[in-house]
Image (tube, rainbow, N blue to C red):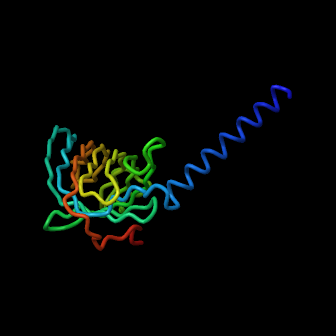
Amino acid sequence: MTPFHRLVLVTGALAVAIGLAAGRAHAGGIPPLDLSGTWTGVVKCKSLAGGVKRKVTLTPIMRVVQNGSALGIVLDYGTGTNAYIGTFVPDAKKPDAKGELAILYCKTNDRVGDDPDFDELGRMSVKAKPGELKGTFKGASIFSDPGTFTDTEAGTCKWSYKRTALDMPSVPSTCAP
């Protein structure tokens, strides 16, 4: 057997093993990580608004619904809400317990800092075990806000949440048009 044929066999076997593991992880062998539920925590933001440094700490309740790799996320401030969508990327070694998310504020568009709304994009790290309440949701986002007149704002936020309920909130997993 030539070195090329050995490489083909090893590569093929590895591809089959990865495919079987992925299929087992998502076809009932290993329950998938489900982030659905209600979460409490904090979002701490630092920004430059109108040339002035600013720090803000926010404590909205976060509601999450997961459908496969798609997530709907709503931050509820009590006086209003912000909707996000996300995609879940499972950890290769522990797909049932941890992974990462890419999230996007639903009113984000392709023009940074324009009216009428802000733009935000983030990367989160998540940990939870299937059927268990305990879960963490941490990460960072970057945003731009048109503000009013000349006080356009650009900043970053650090998110840190713990799951407090395993409910299925009524949250869309797609952005409204």
**Residue 15: which quarter of the image?**
top right
The image quarter in which residue 171 lies: bottom left
Q: Position of residue 10 (x, y in %)?
A: 71, 35
Find residue 71 and report its horizontal and vertical position in percent. 39, 61
- Residue placed furthest toward the front: 29
What residue lies at 17% left-to-right and 52% top-to-bottom? 41
Q: Position of residue 39 (x, y in %)?
A: 22, 58
Q: Quadrant of the N terminus?
A: top right
Left or right: residue 127 compared with residue 77: right
Question: Foreground: 75 or 33?
Answer: 33
- Image coords of residue 146 (percent x, y): 28, 53
- Count of numbered marks: 0
Quarter holding residue 123: top left
Q: Is residue 41 above or below residue 77?
A: above
Side of 23 where 157 appears, left or right:
left
Residue 159 lies, with reference to residue 168, above or below; the image says above
Instruction: Judge by depth and name the residue closer to the eye, 20 or 90.
Output: 20
Q: Quadrant of the C terminus?
A: bottom left
Q: Going 21% across and 52% down the picture, which residue do you hit?
A: 162
The residue shown at (24%, 57%) is 133
Closest to the observer, 85 or 1: 1
**Left or right: where 19 falls relative to 52:** right
Q: Residue furthest right?
A: 1
Identity of the residue drawn at 81% across and 25% down: 3
